[in-house]
Amino acid sequence: MKSDSRLSGVLHVLLHMAQSSGPVTSETLARAMRTNPVVVRRVMAGLRERGYVRSGKGHGGGWTLARDLAEISLRDVHEALGDPTLLAIGHRSDEPGCLVEQAVNAALADSFREAEAFLLARLGAITLQMLSADFHARLARRTSPESSCP
Amino acid sequence: MKSDSRLSGVLHVLLHMAQSSGPVTSETLARAMRTNPVVVRRVMAGLRERGYVRSGKGHGGGWTLARDLAEISLRDVHEALGDPTLLAIGHRSDEPGCLVEQAVNAALADSFREAEAFLLARLGAITLQMLSADFHARLARRTSPESSCP
DNA sequence: CATCACGCAACTATAAAAGTTACATGAAAA
DNA sequence: TTTTCATGTAACTTTTATAGTTGCGTGATG
């Protein structure tokens, strides 16, 4: 089962945007995410709708943060992506006639719900500000501070 | 992202096996899991290796439980399936040169690890015995007790 | 008005999972 | 001992979700 790395990718570009003074183009962000510009626009669309970022057309256009990093949690970002399923396992049918399957599903559904709630709470407790602080700490630790991204 | 329903499927057939006095063929189990016999053999192979079930060839062959239901937890079953990834989200690269990405990955990895541990603990606390008890409770609640599975 | 950048729809490619086929092995029954 | 039944496994095909691509429209800037 292949895992969805959009959250990680979007966080990456958001922090890059935070580092930049002006707007950053999809083209540039795509290079950081190692994907292509259209994919970037696709995933950023949800963030724009929620007012976390803004996009501008034409010369000097591109993406800019519309909020302070401290006001955006990882959970916010996850939701802006259309909160995709967090768990890789699930059950086969939702309304099984089989009582055995009902019992199995009930037990699993409980555990899954709890685990998702747990993870969402964790993500809700982490802001982009914190990630940025961690990044700067790493940057300071580096002997020769060079460009943040290859 | 499509979720892996093997755990749910295997639990289903294990409980069915518990209901049956003799061995149950892959053919029969496949019908309960709504899949085909080869898939059943494939997923059951891990359970056999760990001694949870036994398989027999030829006439009167098929699958039988080799342990008491109380001795098998959902976590055991999950591990027997080769413990597939529990989370549907992950990160893009494991050893990023980019410090921004490192910071992102570190934060996510922590949360993910905790959430997985949480879920595994939950699964470890549920035995097949408990699921079976729940099934029997459901069966008793039914006004007209009929066959457990369509 | 030429260029640049996003918006979006539609299409293609890719890769993981499930399903299928085919044949070998071994056990029980006839 | 021969037939039948059931698992063991490898190899192949199908399916499907996701990522990636192309193409064109829109609007902003120089």
Image (cartoon, coloured by chain):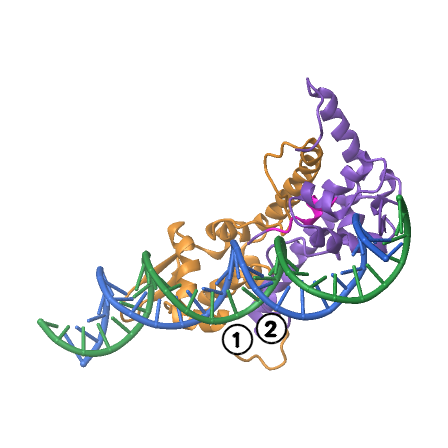
Chain colours: A purple, B orange, C blue, D green
Q: Is residue B141 above or below residue A138?
A: below
Chain identity of mark 1: B
How many marks can you see?
A: 2
| Residue B36 place in picture, x, y as percent | 43, 70
Q: Give residue B39's mark.
A: none
CA distance for labels 1 and 2: 9 Å
Q: Which residues are magenta?
A: A3-10
| Residue B1 place in picture, x, y as percent | 62, 58
Residue at image point 45% right, 55% down: B68
Q: Nearer the viewer, residue A118 or B69?
A: A118
Query: What is the crowding at mark 1: few (fewer than 14 residues within 10 Å), some, or many (at least 20)?
Result: few
| Residue D16 place in picture, x, y as percent | 58, 67
Residue B119 is a magenta residue:
no
Residue B130 location, quadrant: bottom right
Q: Give residue B149's mark.
A: 1
Chain identity of mark 2: A
Which amino acid lies under the numbered mark 2 shown in the image of this protein? Pro
Residue A5 is a magenta residue:
yes
Query: What is the crowding at mark 2: few (fewer than 14 residues within 10 Å), some, or many (at least 20)?
Result: some
Dominant secondary-structure state across the stretch colored magenta: helix
Q: Is residue A66 above or below residue B32?
A: above
Q: Say which residue label 2 marks.
A: A96
| Residue D2 place in picture, x, y as percent | 12, 76
Q: Nearer the viewer, residue B22 or B53?
A: B53
